Image (tube, rainbow, N blue to C red):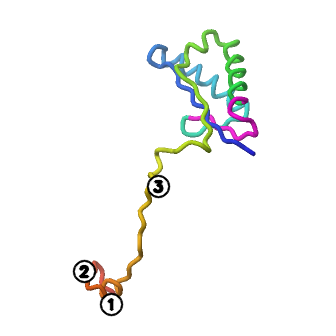
Amino acid sequence: MSNEFGLFVNLDYAHKSKDECALIWQSIMNTMLNYGFSFRKRAFIICTEKNRDEIAVDVRHLFDEIQAGQQDFYSYITDCYILNYESCNDLTFPDTSDTIEVEDISLEDLNIIGVDYDLLFKHK
């Protein structure tokens, strides 16, 4: 069974220079893309047969490789986490937990029950 995970990395822009953060971000981007992640909406996405814990171990090893070439690499990261997209809700989508039921009522039905209405466009 394939799992889809999102890896989110936030850098310490408040305490590090913008240029240094840009270099660190490029290192992270290159490493994640070379490992098989894609990048979408602030997250590195990977579809894999591995579970979350296995992906976490892999990412730690990848970050250790970056640390070997970039001194103080970890000091640039404020937080980093992995989410299983199958168990997440995208809050940018409308809430459908309490759906509204819509009933299709024809003009004939309105006439039958005596509801007055005005047509904006009258058919000729």
Amino acid marked by disc 3: Thr
Q: Which mark is residue 96?
A: 3
Q: Which residue is mark 1?
A: 124
- The residue closer to the viewer here, 59 or 123, is 59
The numbered mark, 1 or 3, whose residue comes first in the sequence reads: 3
User: Helix or strand or loop: what does disc 1 sit on?
Assistant: loop
Q: Is residue 65 above or below residue 51?
A: above
Q: Which mark is residue 62?
A: none
The numbered mark, 3 or 2, whose residue comes first in the sequence reads: 3
- The residue closer to the viewer here, 63 or 48, is 48
| Residue 112 lies in quadrant | bottom left
Q: Nearer the viewer, mark 1 or mark 2?
A: 2
Amino acid marked by disc 2: Asp
User: Helix or strand or loop: what does disc 3 sit on?
Assistant: loop
Judge the density around disc 2: few (<14), some (14-19), many (≥20) Cα neighbours within 10 Å: few
| Residue 31 lies in quadrant | top right
Q: Which mark is residue 118?
A: 2
- The residue closer to the viewer here, 49 or 46, is 49
**Separation (CA) of disc 1 from disc 2:** 15 Å
Q: Which residues are magenta?
A: 43-54
